[in-house]
Every structure is written in structure tokens, then in C-alpha cells.
Image (spheres, rainbow, N blue to C red):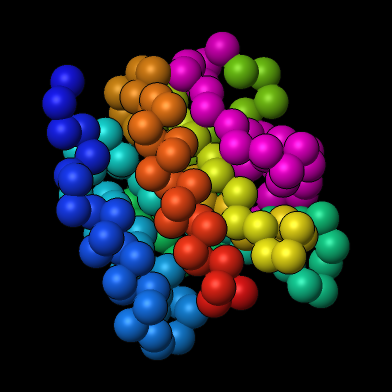
């Protein structure tokens, strides 16, 4: 499948970060842009490490269906596992994963990419897909480039 991720999208997202504005506005804009531009991105959101409650993720800006998982302890679900290991995670089939927090029965696969600031895990970009095995190395590389630029606004 060619052009799963539009070639100009990375430059557009990076320029939206350098254009400035409030952190929430920038993150909201990224979520909307990614979800509307990439067909296999069905839910796009940021979880942010709570400065007042260590080892806890709080739901930040997102685009997609509302989720009940607004507070996630490190270690819990795919998001919490990524935070605990400080690693990107790709899950091809969420129904095969025992440590998973379901947001919707439509979700089939998921990717989580860390946002690191001075080697500290400060946030993560979480994307759900209704397509099984939707995420590949090109998604990980593309989203890692975005998360690396996003760390400038933390
Ligand atoms: N599925 C995630 C929870 C967040 S929702 O996908 C929005 C998890 O297992 O951590």
C-alpha cells in the first residue's frame, strides 16, 4: 500500500509546532491533523505524565471517541506499559493482549510513542486503529519524529 502516510504531513505537523501557541492548542491541532490525514488513525491522543502524581498518565488533547480511560497508572494497559518501559509499543491485535484497557470494541490495533524531555518520560502519543495490524515501522518513525519535536513544548 503506497502513501499510507501523506508525504507532506510531517513537514506540516512540524511547522504547526514551530508556529507556537498554547501547548494544548498545538497538541489538539496535531491530533486533528493526524486523524483526518491518515485513514488508519481512528483515535489520536496525548497522555501526559501528571506532575503532581508521579507515575500516572492523564488524558490530554485527543481527537476521536471519548474514552473512560482518563487516568492511567504506569504499568496498566498498553499506555502504562509504554510509560513503565519508556519504549514505543505496537500491538497488532489488542484482543490478544491481556494487559489492555479497551476504549471501544472497534479498536483492533494500537501504537504508543513516548515524548521524552531531557531523558524524562513526560507524555506519550497514543493512536488506535480499527484495522488489525495497522501500524508498521513507517508509523513508528513518523510519529517518533513528531514526538521528538513535541518535546520542545514541554
Ligand atoms: N488502550 C489503551 C487505553 C487508552 S485508549 O486506547 C484511548 C491502553 O490499553 O492503555
Q: Position of residue 47 (x, y in %)?
A: 58, 57
Whether residue 58 is visible to the viewer of this picture, yes or no, is no
Residue in the foreground of this view, choosing between 8 and 81: 8
- Quadrant where the N terminus sits is top left
Q: Quadrant of the C terminus?
A: bottom right
Nearer the observer, 69 or 96: 96
Q: Is residue 92 left or right of residue 5?
A: right
Q: Residue furthest bottom?
A: 21
Q: Does the magenta stretch include residue 42?
A: no
Name the foreground residue: 74 vs 22: 22
Q: Residue at x 69, y 50 (%)?
A: 72
**In this view, 51 is above or below 133:** below
Judge from the rendering whether residue 21 lies leftward or rightward of residue 100; answer left or right.
Answer: left
Span of residues in magenta? 70-96
Quarter of the figure with residue 50:
bottom right
On the image, the x and y values in percent for residue 12 come to 24, 64
Please determine whether, in this image, residue 44 is positioned above or below residue 59. above
Q: Nearer the viewer, residue 113 or 12?
A: 12
Amino acid at each position: 500500500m503506497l502513501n499510507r502516510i501523506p508525504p507532506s504531513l510531517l513537514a506540516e505537523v512540524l511547522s504547526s509546532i514551530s508556529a507556537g501557541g498554547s501547548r494544548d492548542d498545538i497538541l489538539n491541532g496535531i491530533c486533528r491533523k493526524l486523524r483526518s490525514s491518515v485513514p488508519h488513525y481512528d483515535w489520536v491522543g496525548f497522555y501526559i505524565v501528571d506532575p503532581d502524581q508521579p507515575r500516572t498518565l492523564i488524558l490530554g488533547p485527543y481527537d476521536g471517541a471519548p474514552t473512560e480511560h482518563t487516568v492511567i497508572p504506569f504499568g496498566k494497559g498498553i499506555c502504562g506499559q509504554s510509560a513503565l518501559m519508556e519504549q514505543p509499543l505496537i500491538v497488532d491485535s489488542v484482543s490478544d493482549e491481556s494487559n489492555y484497557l479497551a476504549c471501544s470494541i472497534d479498536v483492533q490495533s494500537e501504537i504508543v510513542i513516548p515524548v521524552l524531555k531531557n531523558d524524562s518520560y513526560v507524555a506519550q502519543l497514543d493512536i488506535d486503529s480499527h484495522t488489525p495490524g495497522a501500524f508498521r515501522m513507517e508509523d513508528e518513525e513518523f510519529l517518533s519524529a513528531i514526538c521528538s519535536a513535541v518535546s520542545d513544548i514541554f
